[in-house]
Amino acid sequence: MSWQKKLDEWHKAGILPASTAQAIRNYEETQPRLTDAIWRYGLFGLAALCIGLGLWFIIAANWQSIPFSVKLGGHTLLNLAFGAATIYFYRTRHDIVPAVEIPLLLTAAGQLSIMALIGQHLHISSPMEDVMLHWWLLIVPMLLLVGRTFFSGALVLGLTIFVAVTKLDLDFRAYFIPIFTLAPALYILSHAPKFKSLKPGWIVITRLIGLYTPLFFAVLILIEPSAFAGRRNAASEIIYNNLFGGVLIAAALFYLWREKSTALNLQHHAHHVLAIILATATAGLGQILIFAKNDHTTMAIVFCAFFLALGRIAYHHQRRWMLSAAILFVAGRMIVYFSQMSNNMLVTGVAMIAIGLGAIYLMRKLLPHMKAHA
Amino acid sequence: MTRSKIIFAALAAALFLPTLVNLYGFFSLSDKAEARPVFRLKLGGFDPRDFSRGRYANLRIEWLPDETEPDCVTPQQTKPDPKTGRLYGGQRPRLQCQFCITKTADGATHTAFIPPDEIKKRSCAVVIPRVTVNFQSNGVTNLQAWHNSMMRFYLDERLADRVDAALRNNKHEFSADVSFDDKLKPYPREFYIDDKPYRDFIEGR
């Protein structure tokens, strides 16, 4: 129940005088709404996601045309930049764990991918255990020095066990494996700050990441990577993709349910959840229809027009969750359409950047005109 | 040095050194690969893969020599296989013929299957030991190296499907420019279809 309804109830019950109820109402209306912040962060996240994926697709589409020296130089600079960002945030924002941890994990992951890049160029086919041992040697010092979260601990633990078992031919039951591998991980975990100690701004962003990460994968799955391999329109793949998308959405719902007792309650998140469910379910339905009719263009136009109309109604009635659904669906539908029609990652990448820029435009133009959520 | 400077130095080393180590590894491996002689060898089997969208083909060197010393081909007759009728001479532990790879004056690759005492007389650039000889009933000699003869060759993703089709088509001959490291592990440098670099063959140049 919203606070406005509660106020009305208390006023009707004679607990609160009309002047006080009106004063509370006046005060609250002047305060920035939490939903505004979530909406803006969410839309910004979606825009950043689209632009990031778009750039990724454009690079991927031209991967074979990019000279190796440019790839190696670019990747090296990226790795060094992640390392520099880790040091910067470690020294200036030590209390904000994600600010340090995210560039740290990206630095660690960057070592593995640059090894893969070099290996492909020189046609080296090293055994997996050799690759993992090399990676372990490179990243464990940085994870032990800087890492403070479960992810760092799990990475150190998992890699150490893998390397120990595969490279040293050790038995899983050997006593010293748990001692030498669990000890550093437990040390890291014991120093990991509690979730509640994060600053409010980061709490919002962290939870939105928790919400939009499944969406990210759902969108990726809906794009159907198989479309690029010339195996599109396979019924089993469509069903599988949508089932998988459903599981991810269920994970998002579980995450939100678990967080409902906190300041950001389920009611606030419900707008996003409904938007995601609607967007994914309709995109899935659209895919099945496309499979039946084999007419991508008509279906894309019909569904986009329907959801744009829905978005217009939502805007008129100030229903943000409907507007969210419309934007998310149109974005998802356009991505699927471009990927299926063009079978070209370059076109898809450009389309996604356009969608991301469109989301930023909407955020700047439409949101200031919307009233506080009532 | 103050405590904070030590911490900073340790952090910088932990975060930047791995990238520099990887770069050093690349230049070191690249220099070594450039310095090694390259031989054009025929390919036997293949195993096309599509692992996480990274397209590569596992190519197998076919150890068929241009020249074979008579001592290395005399079959040691044993019991024929009841199913195939093949006579397996199997390994020749006494003679232990070896695979000698040389470069001719015109830069071509010459391969020979020769006894060990011949190895010193010839200027072999690479000697592949422990080669097993199978004798088949139809007289065809099939050499197999115990040595690892599989190589992973990363293909241009845009051409991978057509290369895959060509590999599955038995009408073509495949070869590769190969260099060997100190442990005799083979590294492919270029892949040829009907003596043309695979890019040229696929694009009809």
Image (cartoon, coloured by chain):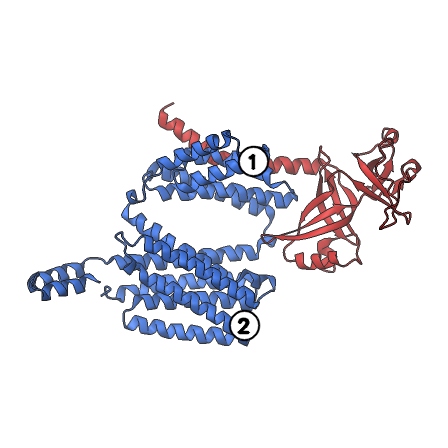
Chain colours: A blue, B red
Q: Residue at x 70, y 51 (%)?
A: B47
Name the image quarter holding the C terminus of chain B: bottom right
How many residues crowd mark 1 within 10 Å: few (<14), some (14–19), many (20+)?
A: some
Judge by depth and name the residue closer to the eye, B184 or B49: B49
Residue A69 percent across, percent down from the top left: 59, 45
Q: Nearer the viewer, mark 2 or mark 1?
A: 1
The answer to whether residue A187 is left or right of residue A260 is right
The type of residue carrying mark 1 is: Val
Chain at numbered mark 2: A
Q: Residue placed farthest to the top in the image?
A: B1
Disc with the residue nearer the chain's start (2 vs 1): 1
SS assignment at label 2: helix
The image's mark for residue B112 is none
SS assignment at label 1: helix
Name above or below for residue A294 compared with residue A206. below
Judge by depth and name the residue closer to the eye, A347 or A253: A253
User: On the image, which quarter does residue B99 sit in?
Assistant: top right
Q: Residue at x 32, y 74 (%)?
A: A313
Name above or below for residue B176 compared with residue A358. above
Judge by depth and name the residue closer to the eye, B186 or B191: B186
The answer to whether residue A5 is left or right of residue A284 is left
The type of residue carrying mark 2 is: Phe
From where the camera sits, is residue B162 visible?
A: yes
> Which residue is tagged 2?
A291
Residue A319 percent across, percent down from the top left: 29, 68
Q: Residue at x 47, y 37 (%)?
A: A156
Name the image quarter holding the N terminus of chain B: top left
Chain at numbered mark 1: A
Q: Residue at x 55, y 74 (%)?
A: A294
Residue A333 percent across, percent down from the top left: 46, 68
The image's mark for residue A165 is 1
How many residues crowd mark 2 within 10 Å: few (<14), some (14–19), many (20+)?
A: some
